[in-house]
């Protein structure tokens, strides 16, 4: 059984610092048997990154729709697992106002970082919270999950305007604002005519990230982890997309020579 201290030691072994800015995608089941369960996991993360900025996705894309269209950031649960949902309830954690791809944040400059997401018109709008992970030199830790869950790659595709990623027509949502009242937004949602989940193609980038040093392996409890540098992920993905903009959907695998010149 893992203790809070065991989990903190795993973070240290991955070379992470208390001052880091980090986005964590997680599978609680993959971590194994933890004394105190998911709450202990959250305790370990919040204590370890006490001098930094700790974030998790707080997505609601699975439930938000044309008929279920009012997003209440205080009460709406996330559709991405137990750790984000418990994290949202912690004192000091704030949530962005994006109706489908919100972020939960705690720590250094958390409030200022999440501002403005109620003005987004796509899931990972350029200049929004997801895109700016690279600008603030964030790290992305995938705990027991792969790049299929790496939302940041959606933001890279949006910057590069990859075709067949968004609905032609927007969906109308209403956001419950902190000061009261509702703000109406129109948002294009993820869509591709050939696959229900675009992100299932993102694992095709895994070897490119390892070879170039944009990502490395680690562990957290029983979970196999992938620790990514957001800026490097953006650069390597961008170089690949520049070769062939829709390659992640159109190709079964990405040719190694497309990134081999950038191996660290």
Image (spheres, rainbow, N blue to C red):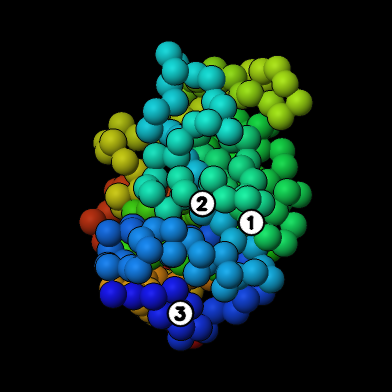
Q: Can you name the residue that lies furthest to the top here? A: 67
Residue under the image location 56 percent in, 27 percent down: 72
Of residues 162 and 103, the one drawn nearer to the viewer in this rendering? 103
Of residues 224 and 31, the one drawn nearer to the viewer in this rendering? 31
Residue under the image location 27 percent in, 67 percent down: 32
Say which residue label 3 marks.
Answer: 5
Q: Quadrant of the N terminus?
A: bottom left
Q: Point out residue 160 in the picture as x, y percentages from the top left corner.
A: 54, 49
Q: Point out residue 27 in the picture as x, y percentages from the top left corner.
A: 33, 58
Of residues 166 and 94, the one drawn nearer to the viewer in this rendering? 94
Mark 1 Cα shell of 10 Å, populated few (<14), some (14-19), many (≥20)? many
Give the mark nearest the N terminus, 2 or 3: 3
Q: CA distance from mark 2 to mark 3?
A: 19 Å
Q: Point out residue 14 in the picture as x, y percentages from the top left corner.
A: 46, 82
Give the mark nearest the N terminus, 1 or 3: 3
Q: CA distance from mark 1 to mark 3?
A: 20 Å
Say which residue label 2 marks.
Answer: 87
Q: Can you name the residue that lies furthest to the front here? A: 36
- Do the CB atoms of the residues marked 1 and 2 lie less than 8 Å apart? yes
Q: Is residue 121 above or below residue 245?
A: above
Residue 79: image quadrant is top left
Is 134 on the left-hand or right-hand side of 65?
right
Q: CA distance from mark 1 to mark 2?
A: 9 Å
Say which residue label 1 marks.
Answer: 106
Give the mark nearest the N terminus, 1 or 2: 2
Which type of secondary structure does the marked residue at label 2 adopt?
Answer: helix
């Amino acid at each position: 059984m893992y203790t809070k201290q065991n989990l903190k030691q795993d973070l240290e072994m991955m070379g992470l610092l208390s001052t880091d800015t980090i986005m964590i995608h997680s599978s609680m089941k993959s971590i194994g048997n933890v004394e105190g369960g998911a709450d202990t996991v959250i305790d370990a993360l919040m204590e370890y990154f006490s001098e930094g900025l700790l974030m998790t996705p707080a997505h609601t894309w699975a439930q938000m729709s044309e008929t279920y269209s009012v997003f209440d950031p205080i009460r709406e649960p996330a559709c991405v697992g137990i750790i984000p949902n418990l994290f949202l309830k912690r004192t000091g954690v704030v949530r962005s106002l994006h109706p489908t791809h919100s972020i939960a944040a705690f720590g250094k400059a958390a409030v200022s970082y999440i501002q403005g997401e109620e003005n987004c018109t796509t899931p990972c709008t350029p200049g929004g919270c997801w895109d700016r992970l690279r600008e603030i030199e964030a790290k992305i830790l995938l705990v027991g999950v792969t790049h299929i869950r790496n939302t940041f790659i959606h933001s890279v595709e949006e910057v590069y305007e990859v075709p067949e990623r968004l609905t032609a027509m927007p969906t109308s949502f209403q956001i419950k604002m902190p000061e009261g009242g509702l703000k109406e937004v129109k948002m294009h949602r993820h869509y591709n005519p050939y696959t229900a989940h675009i992100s299932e193609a993102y694992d095709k980038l895994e070897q490119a990230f390892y070879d170039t040093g944009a990502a490395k392996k680690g562990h957290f409890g029983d979970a196999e982890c992938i620790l990514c540098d957001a800026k490097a992920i953006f650069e390597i993905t961008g170089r690949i997309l520049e070769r062939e903009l829709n390659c992640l959907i159109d190709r079964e695998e990405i040719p190694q020579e497309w990134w081999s010149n950038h191996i660290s």
